[in-house]
Image (cartoon, rainbow, N blue to C red):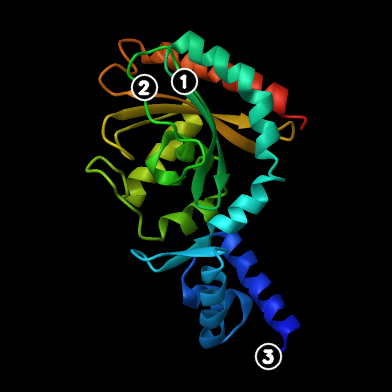
Amino acid sequence: MSGVQSVGRAFSLLEAVGTEPASLTELARRVGLPISTASRLLATLESLGAIERLDDVGMYRIGPSIVKMASSIDSSASLSTIAQPHLEQLAKVVGEAVGLSVAAGYTMHYINQVESDQPIQVRDWVGIRVPLHLISAGLVIMAHWPEEAVESFLERDLYAPTTRSVIDPVKIRERLIRVREQGVSWTAEELELGITSCSAPVFSAAGDILCAVSVHGPSFRFPGNNPRSIENELMRAANVLSETLGPQ
């Protein structure tokens, strides 16, 4: 195999992994390579940090070296900067931490977080990627996916880190319907015990979903006695962000 051919095939595998995490067999099928060839190239890419393997599920995903390179040109950086004052205002109004996240394949990537003045804070999630089904922001994004994309997601084995994680496809579909009807999504202790979150979508001028804005706090105090007030403030902020970020 020539050097140019190897580079081309490796790049094809990177593109395939970037679309969504997948197994060796699936990646070889996507790019039309023998499994042995795909395995050899994936091993090289893994050694360079371009991809990484999730040993518990046998899937490959984009690795830290590619994420680091992409961050320098990622439009999420400017999105985060533009959204910053609006996130700060929301955090001041609701009295809890506010976050901004974007979809990255089958995960949500947290790109900004503004803390509240509360003495007990939730952890800083910036830079972390989380499976869509485990957090309110992910459910908000999925609720605006085409049906076939949702079905493709639900066909996989879904990770359940806590006893409250929802991985039943039927229940997830029902939740997505409620999100579309209500405009917000709630999750409680499904990713991590002790954390409750509420999210709303941010749209482009063309009506495409751009990202999700979230409010999250310790479950012992959040959302408190008036969750509807939290929803109203969150949706108001999401609408302002849609107007601000939509033309970008």
What amino acid is at disc 2?
Gln
Query: Quick check: can you spot residue 121?
Result: yes
- Please tell me which of labels 1 and 3 falls first in the chain: 3
Residue 138 image offset from top left, x and y in percent:
47, 40
Between discs 2 and 1, the one toward the N terminus: 1
Residue ID for mark 2: 121
x, y percentage for residue 104?
Answer: 56, 48
Picture quadrant where residue 216 is located: top left
Instruction: Give coordinates of residue 164: x percent, y percent.
Output: 25, 40
Relative horizontal placement of residue 159, taking residue 213 as reference (left or right): left
Disc 3 is placed on an element classified as: loop
Q: Amino acid at mark 3?
A: Met
The residue under the point 55% across, 53% down is 105
Q: CA distance from mark 2 to mark 1?
A: 7 Å
> Disc 3 marks which residue?
1
Q: Is residue 96 above or below residue 104?
A: above
Marks 2,1: beta carbons within 8 A: yes
Near mark 1 (Cα within 10 A), the count class, few <14, some 14-19 or many ≥20, is many
In the image shown, does 92 or 231 lie closer to the viewer?
92
| Residue at image coords 35%, 55% | 158
